[in-house]
Image (cartoon, rainbow, N blue to C red):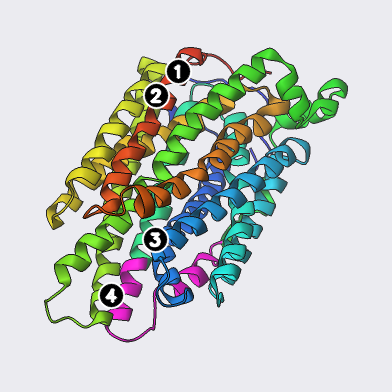
């Protein structure tokens, strides 16, 4: 089969052997391109997490509450992410998976680069909002593309691997942070955050070259040319007009809300927790403020790497376990493990050595949920609503979850402000969000071993 040609609509799967032996050359190409698009998307997210606090320290007036404004910047980014995801999710069903993915990557690359030139909190958050518009569309169209191209047997493994490979983007961001931290420590660059965002804009050029050979899935082409289905492509009215799809969308929303809040309002604040722990450790050592900044950036990079090494293993494992135990039981175990591991980090992390085992364990447990979303959400909706439905679950979940960092900010600056370490108590309180995902599971359909709905 020529690389430029899309695969036939139905490709036989071997009953035994590794799943990847079922894939044609073109299907491998689709997997690689989708993985790169999502990898670079996650690179941008992680660069923001690492750059957020240093940016606030430079852009805010002296005496400002850096933690509070960091939470606001994160919430604004997530609102942009959710807004873009809702729009681009519909566009993915109407315009096509490939074209929409291209638009998404161009948007987040452009505004990631422009974030480097911010001069105030206001233009910084504007650029992050616009970056979020592009970031939001990547997940839904990427997983829809892969789900529709892969053979049925290979689909959950491919989607789990796709999500697992996103950890490479996060680890790359950590390496960038460590390298820039070393340059700051040596006095070669003034700060870490401006170069981070410039670097985050570069990968789009590689993806743009690869997109020339990517074709729309035959499933989508067929649906987009059918008279009745074509009129229903990417419609929220149709999504909520059918009781089956409406129920699936609301269940998926509750599940995604739990994981997204857990990640963005708890797990990613591990970097801030480590920042505070390390600065307390380095105080009184004779290091200059610049040397402390460089050392903290380096160790935050190590923390990010540990988190994402655990995440890679967790996301890859979810794809294997869910094929043996089913979607619902695997999700239930993941939600419980996520709550316990995250609470342990915020309660007890206080030593260097704990970064190397507590943080990877938390990454394994919490990020495994996101492999579940990539596998499960496309299985809940028909072809003409797959991108729309997946985007609704993931991005409305993120839209609602944008309150998470703001709630964390209120907990740290108001509720626990008089405690010795407000962030620890706030993080422990927020861990209850994983209960929401558990409560949604009894209403979720089991999709293991079933073909994609048409």
Q: Compared with residue 355, is residue 90 higher up or lower down, i.e. above or below?
A: above
User: Which mark, residue 294?
Assistant: 4
The residue carrying mark 3 is: 67
Residue 185 lies in magenta, yes or no? Answer: yes
Q: Residue at x 39, y 24 (%)?
A: 331
Q: Secondary structure at mark 2?
A: helix
Q: Residue at x 47, y 73 (%)?
A: 60
Q: Nearer the viewer, mark 1 or mark 3?
A: 3
For mark 2, what is the residue? Answer: 331
| Mark 3 residue element | helix
Q: Residue at x 55, y 55 (%)?
A: 77
- 207 relative position to 45: left or right: right
51 inside magenta stretch: no
Q: Which residue is mark 1?
A: 441
- Magenta-drawn segment: 177-203
* Magenta span dominant secondary structure: helix
Question: Does label 4 or label 1 sit earlier along the sequence?
Answer: 4
């Amino acid at each position: 089969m020529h690389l430029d040609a899309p695969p036939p609509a139905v490709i036989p799967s071997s009953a035994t052997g590794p799943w990847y032996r079922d894939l044609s050359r073109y299907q491998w190409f689709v997997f690689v391109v989708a993985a790169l698009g999502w990898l670079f998307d996650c690179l941008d997210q992680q660069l923001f997490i690492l750059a957020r606090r240093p940016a606030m320290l430079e852009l805010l007036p002296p005496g400002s509450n850096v933690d509070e404004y960091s939470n606001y910047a994160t919430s604004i980014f997530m609102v942009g992410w959710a807004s873009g995801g809702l729009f681009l999710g519909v566009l993915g069903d109407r315009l096509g998976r490939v074209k929409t993915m291209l638009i998404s990557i161009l948007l987040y690359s452009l505004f990631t680069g422009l974030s480097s030139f911010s001069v105030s909190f206001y233009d910084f958050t504007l650029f992050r909002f616009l970056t979020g518009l592009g970031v939001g569309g990547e997940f839904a169209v990427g997983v829809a593309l892969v789900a529709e191209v892969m053979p049925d047997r290979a689909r959950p493994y491919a989607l789990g691997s796709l999500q697992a490979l996103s950890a490479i983007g996060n680890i790359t961001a950590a390496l960038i942070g460590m390298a820039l931290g070393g340059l700051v420590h040596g006095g070669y660059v003034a700060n870490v955050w401006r170069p981070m965002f410039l670097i985050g804009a570069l990968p789009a050029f590689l993806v743009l070259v690869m997109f020339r050979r990517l074709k729309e899935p035959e499933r989508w082409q067929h649906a987009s040319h059918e008279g009745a289905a074509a009129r229903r492509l990417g419609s929220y009215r149709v999504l909520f007009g059918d009781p089956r799809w409406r129920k699936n969308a609301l269940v998926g929303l509750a599940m995604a809300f739990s994981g997204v809040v857990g990640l963005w309002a708890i797990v990613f604040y591990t970097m801030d927790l480590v920042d505070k722990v390390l600065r307390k450790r380095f105080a009184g050592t004779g290091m200059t403020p610049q040397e402390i900044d460089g050392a903290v950036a380096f160790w935050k990079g190590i923390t990010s790497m540990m988190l994402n090494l655990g995440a890679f293993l967790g996301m890859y494992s979810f794809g294997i376990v869910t094929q043996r135990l089913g979607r619902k039981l695997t999700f239930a175990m993941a939600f419980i493990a996520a709550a316990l591991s995250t609470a342990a980090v915020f309660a007890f992390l206080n030593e260097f050595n704990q970064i190397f085992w507590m943080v990877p364990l938390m990454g394994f447990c919490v990020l495994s949920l996101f492999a579940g979303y990539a596998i499960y959400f496309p299985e809940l909706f028909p072809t003409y609503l797959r991108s729309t439905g997946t985007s609704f679950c993931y991005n409305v979940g993120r839209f609602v979850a944008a309150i998470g960092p703001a709630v964390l900010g209120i907990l740290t600056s108001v509720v626990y402000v008089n405690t010795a370490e407000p962030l620890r108590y706030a993080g422990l309180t927020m861990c209850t969000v994983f209960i929401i995902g558990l409560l949604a599971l009894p209403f979720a359909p089991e999709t293991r071993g079933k073909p994609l709905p048409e």
